[in-house]
Amino acid sequence: MLRRDLPLRRTWSEQPYGEEEITRLEEEVLPAIRECLARVDELDQRLLAQHELLLLRCGLEAKRHALA
């Protein structure tokens, strides 16, 4: 049977989390997400610093060519 124009069934949202799932979420999933986000922040900061250095170099190079 086709279910066109009908919302998808989301059985996971129809069944509340049990104690075991909540414990696993708190002990395993949330720390892993925090670690991942910390790594993303670290990489963002590194890329931002590289970008700023590149902009500085380009600006200095443009000034050098203007004076030549």
Image (cartoon, rainbow, N blue to C red):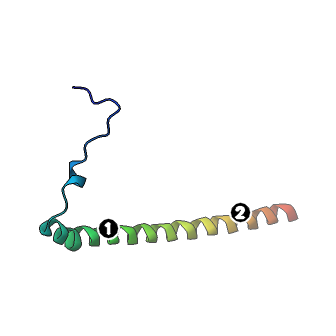
Decide if residue 12 is on the left or right side of residue 46.
left
The N terminus appears in which quarter of the rendering? top left
Q: Within the image, what quadrant is residue 24 found in?
A: bottom left
The circle drawn on residue 33 is 1
Q: Say above or below: 18 vs 8.
A: below
Residue 15 in which image quadrant: bottom left
| Identity of the residue drawn at 32% across and 35% down | 6
Find numbered disc 1 in the image and state the secondary structure of the residue it sits on: helix
Q: Position of residue 39 (x, y in %)?
A: 39, 69
Q: Residue at x 21, y 70 (%)?
A: 28
Taking 61 as reference, is 52 left or right?
left
Mark 2: few, some, or many residues within 10 Å (few <14, many ≥20)? few
- Tell me if residue 65 comes above or below residue 53 in the rendering: above
- In the foreground, 35 or 18: 18
Query: Which residue is painted at 75% across and 63% down in the image?
Result: 61
Amino acid carrying label 2: it is: Cys
Q: Earlier in the sequence, mark 1 or mark 2?
A: 1
